[in-house]
Image: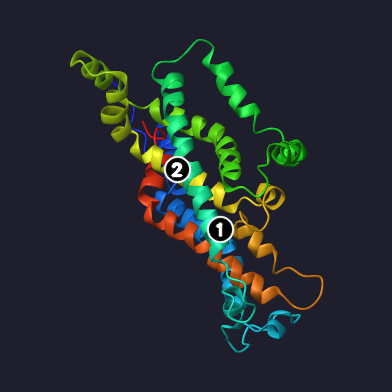
Amino acid sequence: MSTLTPAAPQNTPAGPTALNTGSRKRGKARMDPTRNNTAAGIAAWLLALLFAVPVLWMVLTSFHSETDAATNPPSVAANLTLDAYREFFGETSGVSPWPSLINSATASILSTVLVLLLAFPAAYALSIRPVKKWTDVMFFFLSTKMMPVVAAILPLYLFARTVGALDNIWFLILMYTSMNLPIAVWMMRSFLAEVPEEMLEAAQIDGANLLLILRKVIAPVAMPGIAATALICFIFSWNELLLARVLTGVVAGTAPVFLTGFVSGQGLFLAKVCAAAVVISLPVLFAGFAAQDKLVQGLSLGAVK
């Protein structure tokens, strides 16, 4: 009696393993990192052009005459001239911008230094050696930025007039310091929170006091964050207009106030305003370019673990 042996199947239907293999291949095709990087790069360039075109247009307009700058549509191929820059530097008007630029530099630099001196120990107390209810303290700092400046401008003006601080550069420095201090504490608190506690413990074992720890241990480690905070405070102070417009006059007027003097209800002024904006923007651009590595490192501190 013969035994029948079943024949091996010729065609095997696609099972779950085959389906999963096909799904993984399609998933890899959809999640191609090269394609994703290319799309992200194109989007980044488009976004950069979106921000760069107005700035480039402002620079181009500053080299046009007032007649060509006021044409509609704008005249791109118009003749280039330095008349707007001569007007800004006072060759034709006789009004020099240097006192206003010096006032802006003085107020911005000194207020930034004061902010760092006050924010550094405050951030230490709120991060490395946190006080009780430090979250309430941080919320209080943040709440001071919720009220718009225009809502407090009248009390500030009346106070400055009462104490004789109108058109005083030192009162403006005090205002800029109080304006930037909450932001600086918030930023530096997040930077100091990344300092390893082992370094602090080793310094304490070696007998270092608090001031020595702040100056020799914490400050070098948190220097990128300190530089980023300083640059942002400098930019905010340099670009501030409302407080300077209301609280200053002839003696303590800043560069943004000087720029608004070119805006007139009569005549053409677009080229002069663009030239003034270009010159006043240069210190901020130079500062950002000089500290760009510290700025990027500081703003990204703690983002990657």
Give how far across and how far down residue 90 sits, in percent: 59, 76
Residue shown at 43% from the left, 19% from the top:
125
Task: Say if 253 sits above or below 208 in the image.
Answer: below
Residue identifier under label 1? 47
Query: Relative to the observer, which residue lies in front, 289 or 158?
Result: 158
Q: Residue placed at 61% from the left, 54% from the top?
A: 252
Left or right of 141 on screen, residue 242 = right
- Indicate the quadrant containing the N terminus: top left, top right, bottom left or bottom right: top left
Identify the residue shown where x is 76% and y is 80%.
72
Query: How many numbered discs, if any?
Result: 2
Sort mark 2 into few (<14), some (14-19) or many (20+) by Cα contacts within 10 Å: many
Does residue 2 appear in this view?
no
Q: Secondary structure at mark 1?
A: helix
Residue closest to the far top? 132
Separation of marks 1 and 2 at Cα, in angstroms: 26 Å
Give percent across and percent down for residue 85.
57, 77
Residue 95 drawn at (x, y percent): 62, 72
The residue that mark 2 highlights is 230
Pick whichever, 305 or 130, lies toward us: 130
Q: Is residue 289 above or below residue 19?
A: below
Tag in front: 1 or 2: 2
Confirm or deny contact between disc 1 and disc 2 (CB under 8 A). no
Q: The residue under label 1 is which amino acid type?
A: Leu
Q: Residue at x 38, y 34 (%)?
A: 304
48 shown above or below 108: below
Q: Residue furthest left?
A: 206
Q: Quadrant of the C terminus?
A: top left
